[in-house]
Image (cartoon, rainbow, N blue to C red):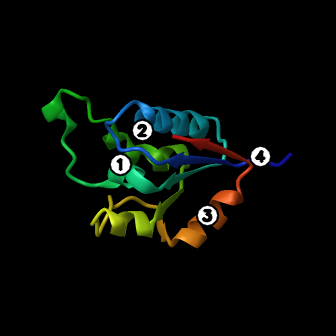
Amino acid sequence: MTNKTLAILNQTAPFSDSSAKDSLDIALIMGSYEQPTCLYFHGDGVWQLVDGTQPEILGIKNFLKTFEAFAFYDIEHIYVCQQSLVQRGLKAVKSLAGITLLDEAEFAASLKQHHFILNF
């Protein structure tokens, strides 16, 4: 039996609401059940991958540190829309294994290959 693949599309800033945390929780849960899962970051979602974020200043727990656990959950494919980075003046993202920068067309084509897409 072939596993169906899941894409988690992150399009919201990390601390604007609970979407970023919810998507991270789902990714880790799916990974713990060995469900093939890929993460996608587009639009304001790319802010989740910026180093040096300090939500503690706002009294918010920094759940973004959990990204470093992806390797333990076999989450090996993380796709980032390069145009989203450029539009926000970002030149780099976290140094995580498995990050691939894609142009808009490649990003859309890659996303379409999954059986299920959860949008956050």
User: x, y (%) of residue 37?
Assistant: 61, 48
- In the structure shown, which secondary structural element does the residue marked by tag 4 occupy? loop
Q: Name the residue type under label 2.
A: Ala
Q: Mark 1 points at which residue?
A: 48
Task: Between label 1 and label 3, give the one nearer the viewer.
Answer: 3
Alpha carbon of mark 2 to alpha carbon of mark 4: how far?
A: 25 Å
**Mark 3 or mark 2, which has the lower sequence index?**
2
Task: Between label 3 and label 4, give the one nearer the viewer.
Answer: 3
Q: Which residue lies furthest to the front in this view?
A: 87
Residues at circles 3 and 4 in contact by the CB criterion of under 8 Å: no
User: x, y (%) of residue 68?
Assistant: 37, 48
Q: Which residue lies furthest to the top in this view?
A: 59
- In the structure shown, which secondary structural element does the residue marked by tag 1 occupy? helix
Task: Between label 4 and label 1, give the one nearer the viewer.
Answer: 1
**Mark 3 or mark 4, which has the lower sequence index?**
4
**Mark 4 or mark 1, which has the lower sequence index?**
4
Alpha carbon of mark 2 to alpha carbon of mark 1: how far?
A: 8 Å
